[in-house]
């Protein structure tokens, strides 16, 4: 139970980065190029963290088969959830007309952040179980990656005329959901055998990796272009150095 409570705490801390990004977008006019730069750096950090903190951990815990199966399932689950979100968003935009496209797009990003946040938070909870403490590289990676999501979504909803209280309540509920996902991830996985734990860890990794490829890097490249690769590499090396020094 102590590990679960620790996971709840750190999952909520990671999720609070969404609120931080949202608040920054509400109170300040942040250039999109900076948002995308943070997103590219965060993508590199996440790739490094899921490689060394999730996939490698899963392999060492439950073997190659459980790891491959988990990554494929996680990728498939995120893919299906993202396609369903895209379909519902397009359908809503057709019904509501052009006047609310900004709000619909911003809300879609918020729902996407929730879809991203659940496997990320579960992964945090799993690292608490497998390592008996929070993994700083994973925590920093998720925190950094959450900031631009809150920024981009809130900026679009603000432009569409949505109220600040509504936006704050939305991101607050998502942050709490992330904390609860980490809590239940740690609680459920504590008593699982090694292969099941490895599979669950790899599922989280597959979902996060697919999210990075589908969302973070393309969005960053759409603005940053030639600098995206350098920023992703910088993020990857930063998280790798943290992993080495922390280990």
Image (cartoon, rainbow, N blue to C red):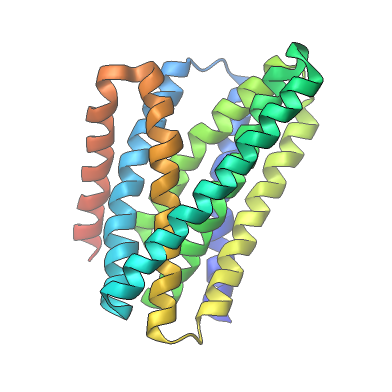
Q: Report the residue at 57% width, 78% height from top.
A: 188
**Residue 1 x %, y %:** 58, 82
Residue 234 vs residue 68: left or right?
A: left
**Residue depicted at x 53% and y 70%:** 6
Say if 121 sits above or below 192 in the image: above
**Does 176 sit above or below residue 55?**
above
Q: Position of residue 228 (x, y in %)?
A: 29, 26
Query: Observer-nearest residue: 122 or 8?
Result: 122
Q: Is residue 182 visible?
A: yes
Residue 17 lies in what quarter of the image?
A: top right
Residue 158 in percent (x, y) is at: 70, 20
**Can you say which quadrant of the picture contains the C terminus?**
bottom left
The residue lying at 61 percent from left, 47 percent from top is 114
Residue pictured at 79% horizontal, 33% vertical? 166
Tally of numbered discs: 0
Is 179 above or below relative to 37? below
């Amino acid at each position: 139970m102590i590990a679960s409570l620790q996971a709840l705490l750190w999952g909520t801390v990671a999720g609070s980065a969404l609120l931080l990004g949202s608040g920054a977008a509400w109170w300040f006019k942040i250039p999109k190029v900076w948002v995308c730069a943070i997103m590219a750096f965060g993508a590199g950090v996440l790739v490094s963290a899921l490689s060394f903190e999730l996939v490698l951990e899963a392999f060492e815990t439950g073997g190659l088969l459980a790891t491959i199966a988990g990554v494929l399932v996680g990728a498939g689950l995120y893919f299906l959830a993202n396609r369903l979100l895209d379909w519902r968003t397009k359908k809503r935009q057709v019904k509501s007309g052009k006047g609310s496209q900004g709000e619909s797009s911003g809300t879609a990003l918020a729902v996407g952040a929730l879809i991203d946040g659940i496997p990320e938070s579960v992964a945090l909870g799993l690292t608490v179980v497998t390592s008996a403490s929070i993994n700083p590289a994973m925590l920093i990676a998720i925190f950094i990656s959450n900031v631009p999501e809150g920024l981009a979504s809130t900026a679009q909803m603000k432009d569409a005329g949505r109220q600040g209280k509504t936006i704050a309540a939305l991101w607050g509920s998502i942050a709490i959901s992330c904390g609860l996902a980490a809590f239940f991830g740690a609680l459920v996985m504590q008593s699982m055998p090694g292969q099941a734990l490895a599979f669950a860890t790899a599922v989280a990794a597959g979902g996060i990796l697919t999210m990075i490829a589908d969302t973070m890097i393309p969005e960053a490249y759409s603005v940053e272009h030639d600098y995206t690769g350098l920023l992703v590499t910088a993020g990857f090396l930063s998280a790798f150095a943290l992993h080495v020094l922390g280990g």
